[in-house]
Image (cartoon, rainbow, N blue to C red):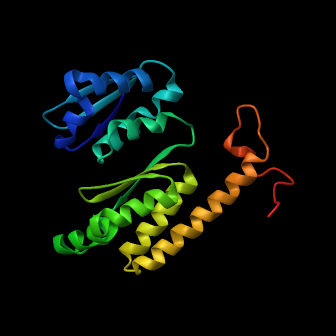
Amino acid sequence: MQHVRIPQDRLGVLIGEGGATMREIERQAEVRLDIDSETGSVGVESVGDPVTALKGPDVVRAIGRGFPPDAALELLDDDMMMLDTIDIDAATRNEKDLRRKKGRLIGENGRTRELMEELSGASVVIYGSTLGAIGQPPEIEAVRGAAEMLLDGAPHGAAYSFLERKHNEMKQQGMQYHEFPQSGSSPRSESQPGSGSG
């Protein structure tokens, strides 16, 4: 059994009305959740397919990091889906700096966070002192790159240009990828010989 600690104000989201969300996670991830509401510690025990169950702790972690349950459950959609978290606190000097840097990542009326989502294709949530992203590895890489630029003090324009470049790269790879429809197309079919048509 693995233990994941999540903030107590997220336990209600994890459990859901009448335990509905918790049961849905248990069903889809093939795990059993043992929630300690005193400490915020969640035990995750595999009860079905061990490979599926490996994602169980990440689903719980994602909800703990501010993701709505449906976004957290997307981790189970595909083997390549992953959760990445950036510790904003680690890049700040004090509470005031943390607020300022969080503000840079969120942007005016949440625009920066929205652009990160739109251009990367990942789900992005800023909660507490972390930025969380759920997506495929290239999507996560785009979000992390932009977030680190902003935390390092780069202008928003530079981070947006970086995201646009990544967006176009992914789109191009996606186009090459769709030229070769394959049964059960695996993400690894991207680098096929002859797929370099520009």
Q: Quadrant of residue 151?
A: bottom left
Determine the residue located farthest toward the top in the rendered image. 47
Provide residue 162's location: percent of width, then percent of height: 53, 72
* Residue 139 or residue 4, whichever sits in front: 139
In the picture, which quadrant includes the C terminus? bottom right
* Residue 2 or residue 52, whichever sits in front: 52
The reply, left or right, for residue 194 in relation to residue 81 is right
Is residue 33 placed above or below 92 in the rendered structure? above
Is residue 65 placed above or below 155 in the rendered structure? above
Provide residue 6's location: percent of width, then percent of height: 25, 42
Determine the residue located farthest toward the left in the rendered image. 38
The reply, left or right, for residue 26 in relation to residue 172 is left
Provide residue 115's location: percent of width, then percent of height: 43, 63
Could one spot residue 65 in this view of the protein?
yes
Q: Quadrant of residue 68?
A: top left
* Residue 122 or residue 46, whichever sits in front: 122
